[in-house]
Image: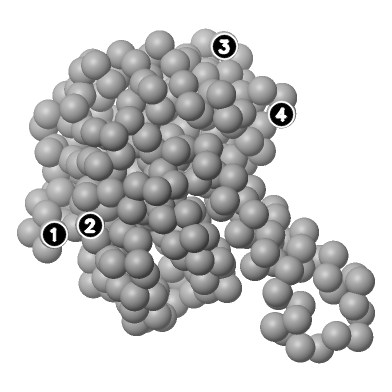
Amino acid sequence: MLVPGREILDAADKGGYAVGAFNVHTIEMLAPILEVAEEKKSPVLLQFSHGSLTFIGAEAISVLVTHAARQARVPVAIHLDHGEGFGQIMQGLRHGFTSVMIDASKLPLAENIALTKQVVEAAHAVGVSVEAEIGRVGGTEENITVNEWEAALSDPAEAEELVAQTGVDSLAPAFGTAHGFYKGEPKLDLDRLAEVNRRVSVPLVMHGGSGVPDHMVREAIRRGVAKVNVATELKDAWSRAVRDTIQAKPNEIDPRKLLGPAREAVKAIVRTKIDMVGSAGRA
Ligand code: 13P
């Protein structure tokens, strides 16, 4: 069933577990994610960056993905990942998303609050949940110095102010995770995460979930994380499987046979992540 993101996140927050938010890069990734969510009886978020929304097509998402989510036997939210600006948010609202992220984290606090508030007003008017970000989640920034690393992390007092002033449904604080693969173990500031959690009542979101060791993710869940974003590991598994299959079967021209193993690769990652975050059996 298709539900607002908030419904899934609030239940996770109360239940002391998290849910996986899996980035869908191509439409072929949709079925394997939903199949595993049903197999594991787990709620799930399907998330689309604006790039994926453009690649797959907003109309295709509004018809195909919303249909698949409605048919699913588990709660499913369709989430816009890193929406930048009001225009992208409007596109999400228009095309059936039940959750949107407004990423105004690059702006000064007052502007982040103003834009996030505007998005909350529009989204809540049509029953759609909103995720905001504060601080900077790293990209490939592992080489930055400690001072720079600390400067990029969320200030708990600012996090509290943003949530109080905007009425946002969930918050992605920066506490050391980064998008993409890590060089070595990620360095997380879990005390800062706990402090943010103490100051705000909404569920917290972990960006950059790929490659974070299970024990760190579980500790982050104990400290308030209710949504764990996974993109890179899915892309990696999917692309490796496609490449290996094409190399192993250079004369195969049936796309279904070339893409079949990639589905299985996506399923394997989704299974391990659902087990890691503890959402199995929670649907
Ligand atoms: P990864 O690519 O590191 O898994 O991060 C995903 C994410 O946070 C999407 O917003």
**Quick one: label 3 or label 1, which is nearer the N terminus?**
1
Per the model, the C-alpha gap separating discs 4 and 2 is: 35 Å
Kindly identify which numbered label has been placed on residue 183.
4
Q: In the image, which is nearer the foreground, mark 3 or mark 1?
A: 1
Crowding around mark 2 (Cα neighbors within 10 Å: few <14, some 14 to 19, many 20+) is: many
Q: Mark 1 — residue?
A: 127
Per the model, the C-alpha gap separating discs 1 and 4 is: 40 Å
SS for dot 4? loop
Q: Mark 3 — residue?
A: 146
Position above or below: 86 against 204: below
Q: Do the residues under discs 3 and 2 have CB atoms within 8 angstroms?
A: no
Amino acid at pointer 4 = Lys
In depth, the one of 139 and 110 nearer the eye is 139
Per the model, the C-alpha gap separating discs 3 and 2 is: 38 Å
The residue depicted at 35 percent of the width and 67 percent of the height is 73
Amino acid at pointer 2 = Pro
In depth, the one of 84 and 238 nearer the eye is 238
SS for dot 3? helix
Determine which quarter of the picture holds residue 146.
top right
- Quadrant in which the N terminus appears: bottom left
Q: In the image, which is nearer the foreground, mark 4 or mark 2?
A: 2
The residue depicted at 33 percent of the width and 30 percent of the height is 16
Point out residue 132 in the picture as x, y percentages from the top left corner: 28, 40
Q: Residue furthest bottom?
A: 253
Position above or below: 131 against 91: above
Q: Do the residues under discs 2 and 1 have CB atoms within 8 angstroms?
A: yes
